[in-house]
Amino acid sequence: MNTTKSILLVEDNPDDEELTLLALREYKLANDIVVARDGEEALDYLFARGAHAGRDPQAMPQLVLLDINLPKLSGIDVLRAIRADERTRYVPVVMLTTSKEENDLVASYSGGANSYIVKPVDFAQFVEAVRQLEVYWLILNQPVR
């Protein structure tokens, strides 16, 4: 894996994408933010296939922020694919979702999620939640390389 502190944001809602990008850029901690708008695109990016076939497959994001309700392939299915592959098994995955459903929470942790965050409705709270995510996962956490 590379040492660039990049984030893969997997989000299909344009408003949530914009808010998340604003929050991530608020503290300028992330060097690079890649956005995938559905589960299939997320896996194509991670495994350097399809539209991302020219990408360096060794250059993994340091963090994946993954929504649950995605088109084409659900966030839970994406999570399972990430954990099933040796190349991505140890990439931290944070479920960042509006779902408060117990079955989504259980499925996420059962599938290997590192964390489960329900998106706050208030923008200031959302920015603070994203800041804390960045500080922990990009600065404090020691990833497997």
Image: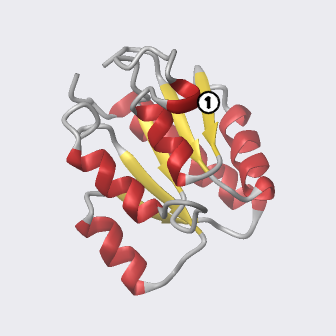
Horizontal and vertical percent position of residue 138: 43, 31
Q: Is residue 101 above or below residue 45?
A: below
Horizontal and vertical percent position of residue 115: 37, 58
Identified at 68% across, 56% down, the residue is 12
Q: Is residue 81 above or below residue 119?
A: above
Identified at 36% across, 55% down, the residue is 79
**Quarter occupied by the N terminus:** top left
Identified at 38% across, 61% down, the residue is 77
| 95 left or right, relative to 129 | left
The reply to whether residue 114 is visible in this rendering is: no
In the picture of the structure, the residue carrying the numbered disc 1 is 33
**Amino acid type, mark 1:** Ile
CA neighbours of label 1 inside 10 A, class few (<14), some (14 to 19), many (20+): some
Q: Quadrant of residue 34?
A: top right
Horizontal and vertical percent position of residue 7: 52, 33
Front residue of this view, candidates 74 and 139 = 74
**Quarter occupied by the C terminus:** top left
Q: Quadrant of residue 122?
A: bottom right
